[in-house]
Image: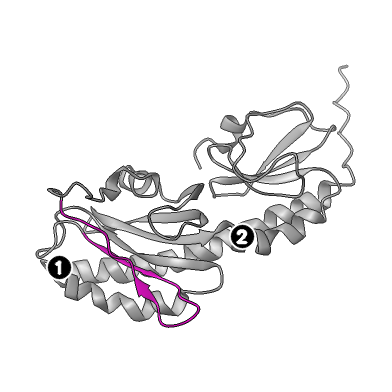
Amino acid sequence: MPQPPTPVPPTAATAPVGRAVSRIGETVRGVFTVLDEVRARTAALARARRPLSRGDLAALRPLLFRHLGGLIAGIGFIAAPGLLADAPWYLEWWQDDPSGPPVQLLRDLDPASSAFYDYTHWEWYAGPSEGAERTICGPYVDYLCTDEYSLTLSVPVTAGCAFVGVAAADVFVRRFEGAVVPVLREVPVPAFVISAAGRVVASNTARWIGGSVFRGEAGFAVHPCDGLPLSVVAANTASPLRSVRKNLRDH
């Protein structure tokens, strides 16, 4: 009779990698939980007040202000073009200011202007508008807002089954690293966090620095953060190479 395959024994890194996956998942889900609050409040406004105006969205500010600071450096609602009666394009977006009250982001939203800011082209907007439930854009240098190396997390907002915009939050990579690098350092092999595109977000090794792209390499295994477009990659000779695209598919 054929013999059952011999189980691959766990390595010394197995438990620390599991803890890293758990901690990183908790950190990111915390931001998405906040965005779910913003989404619910915005959807309620869209259902109750038709047509919506910029003044209606001011009701979101206490909620947005409460969550600014710590991990979240910027947060808000980005309206689908044509949603508001008095502003065809609009962002109810606020940024953390450690020296004072939150600051509203103001951009040129006049389509006739040469400086027009068409936010619909950005991945953090396009992903939710095309049906992605959770999108993580970056890391990238946010030249338009903060000049900081950032991640943008976003979710779609719907009302009556219609897409009305995006709830989003900016997280500075340096703050994200502060939250997750300590647990990555507990992993006794090279380990790092990648986005759905394979871009490195945080790492415990200088070989894989933030912003570099991991496209698969022998001796590394990919450990998805369940339900999130992020994974932990760790050197693990006991595990065969698995494709990044395969592991991140459907997230």
Q: Residue at 41% across / 82% down in the picture?
A: 101
Q: Residue at 72% across / 57% down in the picture?
A: 181
Q: Nearer the viewer, residue 145 or 16?
A: 145
Q: Nearer the viewer, residue 156 or 198?
A: 198
Determine the secondary structure under disc 2.
Answer: helix
Residue type at mark 2: give it.
Arg
User: In the picture, residue 236 is in which quadrant?
Assistant: top right
List the residue tagged with mark 1. 52
Q: Residue at 22% across / 61% down in the picture?
A: 90
Judge from the rendering whether residue 207 lies leftward or rightward of residue 9; answer left or right.
left
User: How many numbered tags mark residues here?
Assistant: 2
Determine the secondary structure under disc 1.
Answer: loop
Q: According to the image, what is the colour scheme of the structure?
A: one colour
Q: Which residues are magenta?
A: 90-110
* Residue count near mark 1 (Cα–Cα under 10 Å), binned few <14, some 14–19, many ≥20: some
List the residue tagged with mark 2. 174
Q: Quadrant of the N terminus?
A: top right
Q: Nearer the viewer, residue 154 or 114?
A: 114
Q: Chief secondary structure of the magenta span?
A: loop
* Residue count near mark 2 (Cα–Cα under 10 Å), binned few <14, some 14–19, many ≥20: some
Judge from the rendering whether residue 183 lies leftward or rightward of residue 48; answer left or right.
right
Q: Residue at 36% across / 81% down in the picture?
A: 62
Residue type at mark 1: give it.
Leu
